[in-house]
Amino acid sequence: VLKKMGLPIPADPVPPPGAKKTPHVNLVDSQLETVLADEDTEEYRHCLRFFLHLAINHTVMCEASNIPDIPVAYSASSPDEGALVYAASHFGFTFSSRDSTGLYVNVRGREIKVIVEADFEFTSARKCSSIACRIQWPEGPEE
């Protein structure tokens, strides 16, 4: 968009030394890291829902990773879909497996089970995908 508007394209962000590196993720945002560090805020709850959506609403498959510090590798039907799941993982919302009853996501150290009730895959007519699910948190009732 910037190029079409004749505006300069900014340089890629430079992560601080020792920052986490995730395939297909090039995002440096210290404010987001601060929000994710405090689970008692409304902003955290909004981020939780957003990243859970990225970690749940997809058709990506998990594979064993051969990259150090990257727990899983993802196989996606489109590069965009894979990048969104990698982005969720980068911020601590890691899709870890799928079975016939649903999928499993590690949410910042807590393994949750997501029971898929209905899945509406992406179509060019709808231009989106949707999922209806129940989330089983280890410390509480389903949502």
Image (cartoon, rainbow, N blue to C red):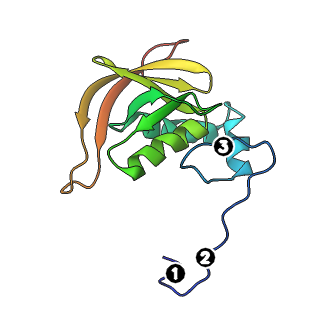
Q: Residue furthest bottom?
A: 6
Q: Residue at x 46, y 13 (%)?
A: 141
Q: Residue at x 54, y 24 (%)?
A: 106
Labelled pair 2, 1 in contact (Cβ < 8 Å): yes
Q: Residue furthest front?
A: 66
Q: Nearer the viewer, mark 1 or mark 3?
A: 3
Q: Hey, what amino acid is under mark 3?
A: Lys
Residue 32 is at least partly visible in this image? yes
Residue corresponding to mark 1: 3
Residue corresponding to mark 3: 21
Question: Looking at the figure, which quarter contains the C terminus?
Answer: top left
Residue corresponding to mark 2: 9
* Mark 2: secondary structure: loop
Q: Hey, what amino acid is under mark 2?
A: Ile
Name above or below for residue 118 compared with residue 29: above
Image position, residue 97 (x, y; %): 42, 23
Between disc 2 and disc 1, whose residue precedes?
1
Mark 1 neighbour density, 10 Å: few (under 14) some (14–19) many (20 or more): few
Say which of 29 and 16 sits in front.
16
Q: Hey, what amino acid is under mark 1?
A: Lys
Name above or below for residue 58 compared with residue 126: above
Q: Residue at x 30, y 17 (%)?
A: 101
Say which of 79 and 41 sits in front.
79
Q: Nearer the viewer, mark 2 or mark 3?
A: 3
